[in-house]
Image: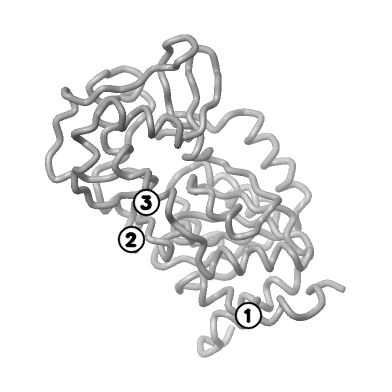
């Protein structure tokens, strides 16, 4: 591999050698849409670790703190728009060479950008579940309930954080009121996989089924520090499946990669701009 070859040319060659790409995306795909990432270039936390399943379900104070921050942060995710990376991946799907897109992101921007065959590995932030009756609510409906119960919080200033979180200048979770399920009064939880929680078995089985049908794997914007995504890179390596990754900085799967591009996702995918006006890659 010539080190002077532009990354977009290297990725184009990788893509054009395969007909059924298993594409796995992470936070680096959404940072240009204004949604921060958890980790720095070394894969180290840039902020306090996120909420865990154990704390959310086991502590009323932690749950109130989560929803207070989420109430302030949701508006940023709701208003975020797809960027060049999302649009490029929609083009990649249109070429017919993508088996599936599996995303670790919970922002829904791949769908908004035009992708259709998507597995939301960690769920979706725009949905809320009742842990008692399993009813699903639109996040905007829950947002209205949060704001109605906590009108004084609506004007709080807060810095944006990953996955719809926010960092208010001051926090008083004891004074924050958390709504319950309007049907059964059960505990409400965003329909996302928290740290310490497993990916739902059926969703994981679907992703693994799609993985088995693929002939190569491409990782975009993820350091793969979380096992739910890293497991696919390990499986690709064991299977002898070609494995490429585009990410700024360290990747947990670096020793397993056939191609590593340390650059922005939109740069590596820029070769797809011309594909929007031509025939599919694999005619």
The image shows residue 185 at horizontal and vertical percentages of 42, 11
- Could you classify mark 3 by the number of other residues whose Cα lies within 10 Å: few (under 14), some (14-19), or many (20 or more)? some
Residue 96's quadrant in the figure? Answer: bottom right
The residue wearing badge 2 is 42
The image shows residue 227 at horizontal and vertical percentages of 49, 42
Q: Nearer the viewer, mark 1 or mark 3?
A: 3
Is disc 2 placed on a helix, strand or loop?
loop
Is disc 3 placed on a helix, strand or loop?
helix
The image shows residue 142 at horizontal and vertical percentages of 42, 30
In the picture, measured across the screen, residue 95 lies left or right of residue 107, that is right
Mark carried by residue 76 = 3
The quadrant the C terminus occupies is bottom right
Q: Which residue is pictured at 78% across the width and 50% down the height?
A: 213
Q: Nearer the viewer, mark 3 or mark 2?
A: 3
Q: Which residue is pictured at 38% across the width and 56% down the height?
A: 35
- Name the colour scheme: one colour
Report the front residue among 186 and 234.
Answer: 186
Query: Image height check: is 264 above or below 9?
Result: above
The residue wearing badge 1 is 271
């Amino acid at each position: 591999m010539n080190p002077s070859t532009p990354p977009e040319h290297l990725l184009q060659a990788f893509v054009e050698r395969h007909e059924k790409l298993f594409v796995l995306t992470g936070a680096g795909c959404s940072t240009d849409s204004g949604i921060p990432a958890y980790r720095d270039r070394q894969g180290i936390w840039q902020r306090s670790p996120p909420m865990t399943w154990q704390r959310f379900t086991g502590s009323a104070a932690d749950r109130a703190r989560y929803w207070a921050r989420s109430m302030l942060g949701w508006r940023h995710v709701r208003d975020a728009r797809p960027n060049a990376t999302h649009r490029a991946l929609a083009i990649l799907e249109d070429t017919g060479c993508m088996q599936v897109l599996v995303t670790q992101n919970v922002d829904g921007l791949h769908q908004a950008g035009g992708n259709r065959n998507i597995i939301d590995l960690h769920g979706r932030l725009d949905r809320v579940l009742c842990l008692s009756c399993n009813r699903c609510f639109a996040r905007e409906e829950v947002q209205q309930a949060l704001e109605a119960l906590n009108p004084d919080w609506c004007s709080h200033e807060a810095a944006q954080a990953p996955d719809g979180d926010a960092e208010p200048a001051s926090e008083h979770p004891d004074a924050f009121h958390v709504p319950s399920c309007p049907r059964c009064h059960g505990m409400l939880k965003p329909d996302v996989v928290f740290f310490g929680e497993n990916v739902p078995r059926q969703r994981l089985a679907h992703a693994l089924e799609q993985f088995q049908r693929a002939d190569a794997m491409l990782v975009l914007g993820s350091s793969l520090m979380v096992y739910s995504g890293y497991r696919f890179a390990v499986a690709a390596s064991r299977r002898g499946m070609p494995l490429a990754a585009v990410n700024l900085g360290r990747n947990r799967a670096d020793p397993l990669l056939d191609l590593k591009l340390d650059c922005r996702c939109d740069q590596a995918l820029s070769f797809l701009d011309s594909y929007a006006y031509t025939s599919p890659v694999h005619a």
